[in-house]
Image (cartoon, grey):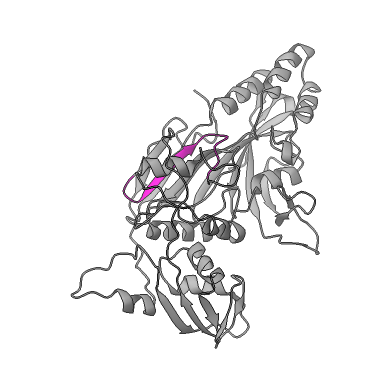
Amino acid sequence: MLSLHSVASCYSASSTKALRFSAAKAPSRVSKIVRARCISSGDKKQEPIANFGGVELVETVDVKAAAKLRLDSWISSRIDGISRARVQSSIRSGLVSVNGHVVNKVSHNVKSGDMVNCTISELQPLRAEPEDIPLDIVYEDDHVLVVNKPAHMVVHPAPGNATGTLVNGILHHCSLPTGPYSYQEVISDAEDISDDEGLCSSIGAASVRPGIVHRLDKGTSGLLVVAKDEHSHAHLSEQFKLHTIQRIYISLTSGVPSVTSGRVEVPIGRDPNNRIRMTAITGSSKHGQARHAASRYKVLEVLAAGGSALVEWRLETGRTHQIRAHAKYMGIPLLGDEVYGGTKNMAISLLQSRTSSSCHGELLKWVSGLDRPCLHAFALGFTHPHTGEKLQFSCPPPPDFADILTQLRKIGTDKPKFKE
């Protein structure tokens, strides 16, 4: 069994069962407009709205005079349970006006006294085909699904990856009908509240819309939560927005951090020289779309005489490629991450300079076999959107990660001591 040392003291690395803790269910907030459209006879408890299509919001903005508030954020706060992606899709579709003028920019700032008229767009049908793809289901009930995603599996269908994605597999698993698929909602939240695991919109059709709440990169393995209804999607998305979702990653790095534990708070934006790569941006002139990003890290083991390290990451924010960009900024790119500097040549050079020549052949063999960044979403915790229970899951890394960790440990391992 793979030992994860200090991580394993908090989580069972071999168990994928949920640990449940009772929690009081938060009272439901319902906007005036939605309540008026959903009241039924008697005093029966109202169920969350399954389909917000056609819901109208006509209201005057009431915020502090000096406050700046995005249009999509304000509308999301006024219609309880709706996903932000759904609001953004409605804005881009020309269904929102401010003071009588149509606004199609989701980041438009509203101020106190503005009159907003919004009609929520209908759910977009699906274009993805259900596929019988084996899925490692860690947990499932009527509302949520937790999946252990393998490395190399793409989460969403996209040009060039129309089949074989996690979405295709989930559609089959949930027995949803085939239909046209809209990428618009997927893209919208990824632009505004995204990370390596960028918040995504729901996917699915008709009244049942399971949705990927967050993404993992194609090369990243590990735990990912899926919502089976729009209420669950909105509730989980809010937890991500408030940073109350617990996410712990482990990685193997090229080199060792100069400080064994700490916090990295450096904005991340799109690399102007490479559109598929993000970059940490320092200094006062934070050009482009750099956004606040903070990661906490801890070295669990120093491996191979300092040629590598097993590092734990806890995300405070969720930006695209956040761990990979912050690791590069720290000078310890992830092992196998060719995009962010963790090249095979760099790894071999670091490791061979610290080990005896008798190990070089094996090192070359193992490092040459790397075909992805050594990053694994090890633990995931969240509040169940319907029961209010605290759920926590953990899952050990797959064989490719575990095997190279074993080889690095054979060369040498040292666990840093931390102050209690």
Q: Which residues are magenta?
A: 141-155
Residue at image x 27%, y 68%?
A: 46
Farthest residue to the top: give it: 358
Magenta stretch contains residue 145: yes
- Between 102 and 394, the residue placed more toward the observer is 102
Q: Position of residue 239 (x, y in %)?
A: 47, 58
Residue 125 lies, with reference to residue 163, above or below; the image says: below
Q: Residue furthest left?
A: 42
Q: Position of residue 321 (x, y in %)?
A: 65, 47
Q: Is residue 302 within the magenta segment?
A: no
Comparing 327 with 233, the one in front is 233
Residue 339: image quadrant is top right
- The quadrant of the image that shows the C terminus is top right
Q: How many dots with numbers?
A: 0
| Residue beneath the point at 67% across and 32% down | 309
Q: Position of residue 210 (x, y in %)?
A: 40, 51
Against 222, is 115 above or below?
A: below
The residue depicted at 50 percent of the width and 69 percent of the height is 90
Q: Residue 130, how many percent across, how many down? A: 42, 42
Nearer to us in this view, 82 or 22: 82
Q: Is residue 308 left or right of residue 392?
A: right
* SS assignment for the magenta stretch, majority: loop
User: In the depicted view, which residue is nearer to us: 127 or 200?
Assistant: 127
The answer to whether residue 417 of the structure is visible from this angle is no
56 versus 318 height, above or below? below
Residue 259 in view, yes or no: yes
Residue at 72% from the left image edge and 54% from the top image edge = 270
